[in-house]
Image: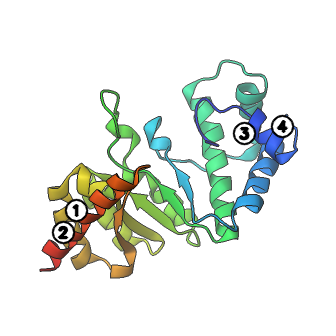
């Protein structure tokens, strides 16, 4: 929610008890969120791939600050690039806080849910490589095997010590591709870099059904 296009500051100001009129205030609110929730959280998650490309440049605070005030304080019209500059800065800040609190950084890569809106240029796993290099102490968890760019995910996880692969949703998304992907992973990666199942559903019955598909798929590959 901290990066979404329709972001509204008020609920976060109220929760943190901080009035937000500039970017440094927003950083303080984010830090307060980490202090409050990190002890019980398992990770932070970025799903910006549903609305923009996932290359996050290292934007300077002095460049992002006036854009933040224009977009989120004065609520003026901003360009896509201006909004991206703020989002990029904020995500880099969140990664640093995740490192401080020992939280993995989960990122949606690959195929979009729902229909009739997807832009494949938004979800390219290779666009994240600059983050892997810049933050070697962060632990990145790439969702959905980057489908249909799954071989890029194998290469990234093989090359970068801080990148891991998460097969949440994939057994339902494309079981055949997931079988092939798992074979590639077992041949190319250490086994502790692979999470072979994740439900990715709000309903227990669907999670259980997906877990059965995953068990059958893993057993088939191993056999």
Residue at position x 35%, y 40% in the image = 112
Q: Residues within 10 Å of mark 4 (few under 14, many from 20)?
A: many
Callout 3 secondary element: helix
Considering every residue shown, the one lying at the far front of the view is: 205
Q: Are the two marked residues, 2 and 4, in contact with CB atoms closer than 8 angstroms?
A: no
The CA span between labels 4 and 3 is 18 Å
The residue at which mark 2 appears reads as 216
Precedes in sequence: disc 4 or disc 3: 4
The residue at which mark 4 appears reads as 20
Asked if residue 109 shows in the view, the reply is: yes
Question: Where in the figure is residue 67, as x and y percent of width and height?
Answer: 71, 31
Question: Where in the figure is residue 201, as x and y percent of width and height?
Answer: 40, 51
Q: Residue 148: give its label.
A: none
The residue at which mark 1 appears reads as 213
Rendered-image quadrant of the N terminus: top right
Q: Nearer the viewer, residue 7 or 55?
A: 7
Question: Where in the figure is residue 97, as x and y percent of width and height?
Answer: 69, 61
Asked if residue 23 shows in the view, the reply is: no
Residue at position x 85%, y 34% in the image = 21
- Of tags 4 and 3, the one toward the viewer is 4
Precedes in sequence: disc 4 or disc 1: 4
The CA span between labels 3 and 1 is 48 Å
The residue at which mark 3 appears reads as 63
Precedes in sequence: disc 3 or disc 2: 3
- Of tags 3 and 2, the one toward the viewer is 2
Precedes in sequence: disc 2 or disc 4: 4
Callout 4 secondary element: loop
Question: Where in the figure is residue 223, as x and y percent of width and height?
Answer: 11, 80
Precedes in sequence: disc 3 or disc 1: 3
Position of 33 compared to 169: left or right?
right
Q: Residues within 10 Å of mark 3 (few under 14, many from 20)?
A: few
């Amino acid at each position: 929610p901290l990066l979404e296009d329709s972001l509204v500051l008020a609920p976060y100001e109220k929760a943190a008890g901080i009035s937000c009129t500039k970017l440094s205030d927003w950083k303080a609110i984010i830090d307060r969120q980490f202090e409050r929730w990190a002890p019980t959280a398992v990770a932070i998650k970025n799903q910006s791939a549903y609305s923009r490309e996932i290359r996050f440049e290292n934007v300077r605070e002095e460049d992002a600050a006036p854009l933040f005030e224009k977009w989120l304080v004065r609520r003026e019209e901003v360009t896509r690039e201006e909004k991206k500059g703020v989002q990029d800065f904020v995500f880099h800040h969140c990664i640093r806080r995740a490192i401080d609190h020992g939280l993995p950084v989960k990122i949606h890569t690959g195929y979009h849910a729902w229909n009739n809106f997807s832009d494949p240029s938004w979800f390219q796993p290779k666009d994240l490589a600059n983050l892997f290099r810049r933050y070697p102490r962060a632990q990145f968890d790439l969702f959905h095997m980057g489908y249909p760019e799954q071989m890029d995910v194998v290469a990234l996880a093989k090359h970068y010590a801080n990148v891991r692969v998460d097969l949440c949703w994939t057994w339902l998304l494309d079981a055949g591709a997931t079988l092939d992907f798992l074979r590639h992973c077992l041949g190319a990666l250490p086994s502790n870099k692979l999470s072979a199942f994740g439900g990715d559903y709000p309903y227990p019955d669907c999670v259980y059904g997906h877990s059965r598909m995953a068990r059958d798929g893993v057993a088939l590959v191993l056999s």
